[in-house]
């Protein structure tokens, strides 16, 4: 029986990880076939395991970002635990950590120290605010970073700000860690040199703030909070149809604007109306335009509005809740769902979004705390008696 090969088969990642950013980065490496050894605290493990209990008793966060990994429990405050970790690092390609500020240095696990004896190891450090600078010692979590980058000031309605509904700073940090590690692996394969990777949640989300940053710096004011509307495009947003259901659409160019006026609104005179003649004019007179659009939406059901807009070539969609998204016909038709194991059961999971032709994604189970501890220690040469003693002392 042949063994399945994946793009990163043969790559070993040791990850001292917790919460979201680092586990998200390493799960994507695991999706590509890397062996990811997740180092957790003895007993409870990664605290993200206890964020909620909605997935057969497991955390929805943890199930999402920890499939296809091996779980090893280690007490790194004990010298024997650190010795085991160093033995693992001697055979690893990548070391990822997102410990609290200063913790890696105190344990001798900062990038400079771990690579001093392992020049081919690629360390990846994920921090909140960077390992240098005035905020290097501050803790960070997702909403703090959303607030400090200005994202929260852009999200919501004119009356109130809002947190984004997903952990966007953690996801941004995890994505840049993932791409940085892939780049470092490629560079090492081509040049033989291993380069440490560092990502901060703040700088990752700062990159995603590029457009509003330019708009604010050179326009003099920041984009307003407009709910589902757009600061620089009109009409753009959700409007209620006669049945009370909302439909989202946007006008992207002058051809679409003319089609909207003549074939949907039934108001061809608006095409060259000085209030709406250009994209900037439409933004400047957004309220007047919204009144016209809302009046037309109120005459038809949401299904009819969608059919009319699609017929004239204008992008549009209904507004799903999460349950409707989970049953989306595109996911069904494209076969994007599969099942993975979790301790005590199975769950539905979505395939990774990047398809590599001819190379299936790895979709192995989510590990229980310390599930692979004995097997990994055996690989490192520890006897059953030694493992039993380590367990008795709470080291593993």
Image (spheres, helix red, strand yellow):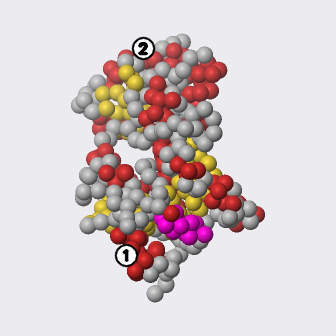
Q: Name the residue under label 1.
A: 388
Of labels 1 and 2, earlier in sequence is 2
Residue shown at 29%/38% (left/top)? 303
Q: Name the residue under label 2.
A: 288
Foreground: disc 1 or disc 2: 1
Residue shown at 34%/22% (left/top)? 294
Q: Position of residue 131 (x, y in %)?
A: 60, 42
Compared with residue 178, is residue 251 higher up or lower down, i.e. above or below?
A: above
Compared with residue 123, is residue 157 higher up or lower down, i.e. above or below?
A: above
- Secondary structure under the numbered disc 2 in the rendered image: helix
In front here: 289 or 186? 186
Q: Position of residue 190 (x, y in %)?
A: 73, 65
How many residues crowd mark 1 within 10 Å: few (<14), some (14–19), many (20+)? some
Compared with residue 7, is residue 234 higher up or lower down, i.e. above or below?
A: above
The stretch of residues the image draws in magenta is 80-90
Please indicate whether residue 230 sits to the left or right of residue 345 in the image: right
- Secondary structure under the numbered disc 1 in the rendered image: helix
Q: Distance between the residues labelled 1 and 2?
A: 75 Å
Residue shown at 32%/48% (left/top)? 51
In front here: 370 or 4? 370
């Amino acid at each position: 029986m042949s063994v399945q090969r994946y793009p990163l088969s043969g790559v070993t990642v040791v990850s001292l990880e917790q919460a979201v950013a680092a586990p998200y980065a390493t799960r994507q490496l695991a999706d590509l076939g890397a062996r990811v050894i997740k180092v957790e605290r003895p007993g409870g493990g990664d605290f993200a395991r206890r964020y909620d209990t909605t997935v057969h008793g497991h955390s929805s966060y943890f199930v999402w970002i920890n499939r296809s990994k091996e779980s090893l429990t280690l007490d790194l405050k004990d010298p024997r635990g650190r010795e085991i970790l160093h033995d693992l690092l001697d055979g690893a390609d990548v070391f990822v950590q997102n410990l609290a500020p200063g913790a890696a240095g105190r344990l001798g696990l900062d990038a400079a120290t771990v690579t001093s004896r392992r020049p081919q190891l690629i360390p990846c450090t994920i921090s909140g605010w960077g390992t240098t600078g005035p905020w290097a010692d501050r803790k960070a979590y997702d909403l703090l970073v959303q607030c400090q980058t200005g994202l929260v000031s852009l999200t919501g309605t004119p009356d109130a700000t809002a947190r984004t509904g997903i952990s966007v700073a953690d996801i941004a940090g995890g994505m840049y860690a993932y791409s940085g590690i892939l780049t470092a692996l490629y560079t090492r394969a081509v040049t033989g040199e291993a380069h440490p990777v560092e990502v901060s949640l703040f700088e990752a989300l700062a990159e995603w703030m590029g457009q509003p940053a330019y708009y604010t710096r050179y326009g003099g004011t920041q984009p307003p909070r407009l709910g589902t509307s757009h600061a620089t495009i009109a009409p753009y947003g959700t409007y209620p149809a006669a049945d009370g259901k909302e439909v989202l659409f946007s006008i992207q160019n002058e051809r679409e604007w003319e089609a909207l006026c003549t074939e949907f609104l039934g108001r061809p005179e608006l095409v060259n109306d000085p209030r709406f003649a250009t994209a900037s004019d439409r933004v400047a007179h957004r309220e007047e335009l919204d009144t016209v659009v809302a009046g037309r939406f109120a005459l038809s059901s949401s299904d009819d509005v969608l059919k009319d807009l699609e017929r004239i070539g204008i992008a549009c969609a209904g507004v799903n809740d999460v349950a409707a998204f989970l049953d989306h016909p595109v996911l069904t038709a494209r076969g994007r769902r599969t099942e993975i194991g979790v301790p005590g059961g199975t769950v539905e999971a979505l395939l990774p979004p990047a398809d590599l032709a001819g190379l299936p994604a790895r979709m192995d189970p989510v590990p229980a705390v310390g599930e692979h501890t004995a097997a990994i220690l055996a690989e490192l040469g520890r006897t059953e008696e030694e493992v039993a003693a380590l367990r008795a002392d709470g080291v593993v």
